Image (spheres, rainbow, N blue to C red):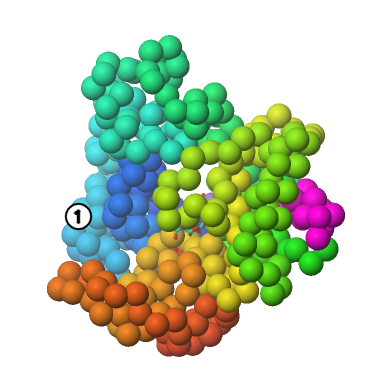
């Protein structure tokens, strides 16, 4: 079953959805925090309609569609285009910004600094900007990292890692997460949880980071390590690049080490999607709890702006299903965790 509902070509709102999707992707590339969410939710609503939505008034009456998005829907129906989208396509600075934001690990601050310094192309950056090792790799493999990974190839990377892992220790386990676990036909990167029943974090680290990674690097499967975005993840996360022996395309690979007592929370976190995670975390915080990739905590004291004033007490970490239960959320299969 296609989780998105009807095939888009049969949907009376197919053209509106197509253009809204492009607009949402644009905001995604611009690393806008909220608009991509609003667009994805509005698109999900439109997909469920049997009738063509033609006016702003009709649109605004539907769930998750605000006034501004409703006006855009009317504009698309009337003109078969969206001026906001056209203007971004014709604006050269905007295009450079999107080009730079497409480099792995580059955010708005860095991209804008380069633009202010007069850089306009990837070649400008290579020849005259001061780049980190990760940025150099992101530029050298810009096209590779922008190419979606077919599901079968995600599986092949997973099997390659699992085979190597089992040779080191047959009790070690690897599980493919992210968009793959949600059933996606292709993925942006490969996300893998590495675990072992009853093993401590220290043991996982020794096997995965001190043995597995070096040996897969020596065999040529792993190409390099990339800088981790958050210092918080040091020690349990590995970001890097892998490439199948039968391919020349470098793929982004994320490894996460997970002890048993955190497995449920880690499965929940690493399955996503990111928007589903945000909404379930918000729900937890409304119930006086806190959810992160390690567990669900209670008795969290929060200040005026929902900022937490203490860590709280662990309620559940092991079981994904129990976390849903405690939060009072009916179980959702990974494929249903979109939005
Ligand atoms: N995640 C999150 N918030 C983020 C980044 C990630 O909650 N800012 C969680 C949810 C994601 C999972 O981690 O589903 C994996 O992150 P990815 O960036 O790899 O995203 P996906 O695997 O979902 O999609 P893609 O196919 O683009 O990799
Ligand atoms: Mg992913
Ligand atoms: Mn990832």
The reply to whether residue 261 is in sight is yes
Q: Position of residue 133 (x, y in %)?
A: 50, 28
Quarter-of-image position of residue 65: bottom left
Residue at position x 59%, y 32% in the image: 144
* Image: 196 above or below 22: below
What secondary structure prevails in the magenta region?
helix
Residue 85: percent from left, percent from top: 30, 38
Q: Quadrant of residue 166?
A: bottom right
> In the image, which residues are magenta?
158-169
* Residue 46 seen in the figure: no
Q: Is residue 57 magenta?
A: no
Residue 100 coordinates in the image, percent (x, y): 38, 29
Q: Quadrant of residue 291?
A: bottom left
Q: Write the residue at 70% across / 60% down.
A: 174
| Residue drawn where x is 31% and y is 24% of the image | 114
Q: Which residue is mark 1?
A: 68
Judge whether 31 appears above or below 47 on screen. Answer: above
Residue at 61 percent across and 35 percent down: it is 224
Q: How many marks?
A: 1
Q: Is 153 located above or below residue 34 in the figure?
A: above
């Amino acid at each position: 079953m296609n989780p998105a509902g009807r095939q888009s070509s049969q949907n009376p709102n197919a053209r509106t959805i197509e253009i809204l999707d492009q607009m949402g992707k644009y905001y995604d590339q611009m690393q806008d925090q909220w608009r991509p969410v609003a667009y994805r939710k509005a698109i999900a609503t439109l997909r469920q309609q049997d009738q063509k939505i033609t006016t702003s008034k009709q649109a605004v009456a539907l769930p998750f569609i605000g006034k501004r998005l409703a006006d855009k829907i009317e504009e698309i129906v009337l003109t078969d285009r969206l001026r906001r989208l056209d203007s971004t396509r014709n604006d050269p600075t905007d295009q450079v910004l999107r080009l730079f934001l497409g480099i792995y690990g580059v955010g708005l601050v860095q991209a804008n600094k380069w633009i202010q310094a007069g850089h306009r192309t990837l070649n400008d950056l290579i020849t005259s900007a001061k780049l980190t090792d990760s940025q150099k790799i992101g530029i050298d493999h810009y096209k590779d990292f922008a190419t979606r990974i077919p599901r079968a190839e995600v599986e092949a990377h997973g099997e390659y890692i699992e085979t190597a892992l089992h040779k080191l220790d047959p009790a070690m386990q690897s599980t493919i997460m992210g968009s793959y676990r949600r059933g996606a036909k292709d993925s942006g990167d490969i996300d893998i949880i590495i675990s072992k029943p009853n093993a401590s974090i220290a043991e996982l680290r020794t096997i995965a980071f001190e043995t597995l990674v070096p040996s897969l690097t020596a065999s040529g499967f792993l190409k390099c390590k990339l800088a981790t975005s958050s210092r918080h993840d040091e020690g349990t996360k590995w970001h890097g690049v892998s490439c199948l022996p039968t391919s020349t395309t470098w793929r982004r690979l994320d490894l996460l080490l997970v002890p048993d007592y955190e497995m449920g929370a880690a499965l929940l976190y690493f399955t996503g999607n990111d928007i589903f995670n945000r909404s379930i975390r918000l729900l937890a915080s409304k119930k006086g709890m806190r959810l992160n990739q390690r567990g669900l905590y209670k008795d969290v004291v929060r200040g005026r702006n929902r900022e937490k004033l203490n860590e709280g007490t662990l309620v559940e970490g092991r079981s994904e299903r129990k976390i849903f239960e405690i939060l009072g959320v009916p179980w959702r299969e990974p494929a249903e965790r979109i939005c």
